[in-house]
Image (cartoon, grey):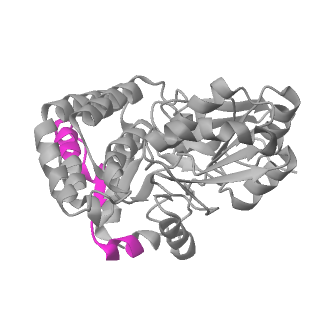
Amino acid sequence: MNTDFYNVRTASKRIAQLTDHDRSAILCELADMTEARIDDLLLANALDLKRMDSSDPRYDRLQLTESRLNSIAADLRNVASLPSPLGRTLKHSILPNGLELTRVSVPFGVIGIIFEARPNVCFDCFALCLKAGSACVLKGGSDAKDSCTAIVSLIHEVLRRHDVPTDAALLLTSHEDTDILLQARGQVDLIIPRGSSRLINYVRENARVPVIETGAGVVHCYIDRAADLEKAIPIVVNAKTRRVSVCNALDCLIIHRDRLNDLPKILAPLKEKGVEIVDEFGTEFLSLRMAVKVVDSLDEALAHIERYGSGHSESIVTEDSEAARRFLAEVDAACVYHNAPTSFTDGGQFGLGAEIGISTQKLHARGPMALEEITTYKWLIKGNGQTRP
């Protein structure tokens, strides 16, 4: 047995015994320490940024700033303030034979997260796992090695102050560690990959541990023939340019042929921000590139999304209630919008505090995965000597 994972399993038992007040206190102190150590964290992040070309689409995801770290601290306090997801009664009944059945929420135990150049994931995943009573194994990409090391060192400092084993947050750094984690059946309860389709496919194909996929986002926005142009323009601009490197950013604008005369007005503010229109469908660009598809009907728009979408986030802009109803009902994606941008697909925006990823699969969890989605449950059965006939 891998000694590190054994120690993580042991640490998970300690976390499960903490009170929710104890867990929240750790997160609040981590928030304070993050604000106090901003300069140190930025120095570590600068080492990672120095190794990456600033034109790389991943550069924005890799970069930490004072503003982003202050936002992270606020998110930590927000997660701390949320109700505990543990010990909730999900179902209760008494059978005719007198057996009392209760289904209650409990921690997973040990959750592994494999991610790429996003050091903020260390904060998000540790906070959610701790609040949900689980230990975490963090496997970041080599691009963010210095940042992740500094962040996890800070987490360990806070854990030691609260007499909690530092193995409650284990950081893996080598490529070989990824394969060890994927094979750790019986030691790690769940693995969640966050990153490119290449990473997610690798995890899916090689893991012996159960996996929840947080898939790549190939995102569309359909401008219907009955769209309000004053709504459509800011929706498209926000979806595409708010942050081009995130999974909920717009990749393909679909427009009804009857609204082609409005296309220049829609594209003008995008071009001002440097957006390049390309003829390429089914691609998650993570950059200032975007495809445009002209369709003759809602049916054709739905068919295009069915063929090229990734099941992440899709949007329709229309004042036609029947078109909106069909789009919301027929699009098979985790998050489907009417007259709003896909940039809202985010655990914090959904009022969940934070997220451990956006699940595009249908088993167990779908959409932003927060506290409720990273707990499981067990049945408690109380009897009084009954036996089964």
Q: Is residue 104 above or below residue 52?
A: above
Q: Is residue 48 above or below residue 231?
A: below
- When asked about the image quadrant of residue 138, the answer is bottom left
Q: What span is colored magenta in the figure?
A: 154-180
Q: Is residue 141 left or right of residue 149?
A: right
**The stretch drawn in magenta includes residue 109:** no
**The stretch drawn in magenta includes residue 163:** yes
Residue 161 coordinates in the image, percent (x, y)? 16, 36
Question: Which residue lies at the image location 86% right of the left edge and 49% below the top edge?
Answer: 299
Residue 281 coordinates in the image, percent (x, y)? 64, 61
Instruction: Note whether residue 189 is visible.
Output: yes
Tell me the quadrant of the picture where the N terminus can be found: bottom left
Dominant secondary structure, magenta:
helix
- When asked about the image quadrant of residue 242, the answer is top left
Instruction: Note whether residue 377 is visible.
Output: no
Closer to us: 159 or 384: 159
Residue 373 coordinates in the image, percent (x, y)? 57, 42
Closer to us: 25 or 358: 358
Q: Is residue 88 above or below residue 154?
A: above
